[in-house]
Amino acid sequence: MDTYKVIVDSGLPSGTRAIGCGCDAENTISDLTAIGDAILTPSDPSPAGRCTHCGCLAYAETELLKMERAAPSMLSALKQAELFMAGFEDCDAQEDMAALEAVRDAITKAEG
Ligand SMILES: [Zn+2]
């Protein structure tokens, strides 16, 4: 196993919300303590520090993390919209069909 020295330089505002430690603490990234020793998984988000309440790793709440958390409900909503809009497929409204195609394209991209 390789080991690394960590320097945390998020470049984010100090008031950025910290999430993911698993307790109910309301931390910002400036509240967090040093990571110390940790096992990190390549491709997972990098932790910003440790929660001062529970000591677990915490992560900066970035737009990407917000989108990752919202992805399952967004995909579900798209599928519901597709079902609803497909009911109008026999109509002649071209704008509605363009919207339906956009929804289907988003679902295809989300599901790979
Ligand atoms: Zn915590």
Image (spheres, helix red, strand yellow):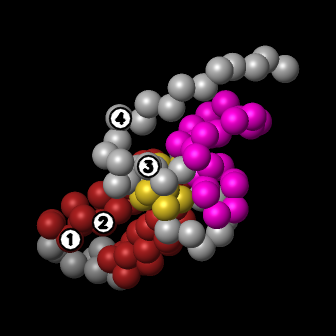
C-alpha gap between disc 2 and disc 4: 39 Å
Task: Tell me the chief SS of the magenta region.
Answer: loop
Mark sitting earlier along the chain (1/4): 4
Disc 1 to disc 2: CB gap under 8 Å: yes
Mark sitting earlier along the chain (3/4): 4
Question: Mark 1 sits on what residue?
Answer: 96
Give the quadrant of the C terminus: top right
Q: Is residue 41 left or right of residue 99?
A: right
Instruction: Report the amino acid beneath label 2.
Output: Leu
Instruction: Report the amino acid beneath label 1.
Output: Asp
Q: Nearer the viewer, mark 2 or mark 4?
A: 4
Disc 3 to disc 1: CB gap under 8 Å: no
Residue at image x 48%, y 54%? 31
Disc 2 to disc 4: CB gap under 8 Å: no
Q: Nearer the viewer, mark 3 or mark 1?
A: 3
C-alpha gap between disc 3 and disc 4: 12 Å
Question: Mark 4 sits on what residue?
Answer: 11
Question: Mark 2 sits on what residue?
Answer: 100
Instruction: Report the amino acid beneath label 3.
Output: Ser
Report the front residue among 8 and 110: 8
Residue neighbourhood size for the residue with mark 3, other residues' Cα within 10 Å, grouped as few (<14), some (14–19), many (≥20): some
Residue at image x 54%, y 26%? 7
> Residue 94 lies in what quarter of the image?
bottom left
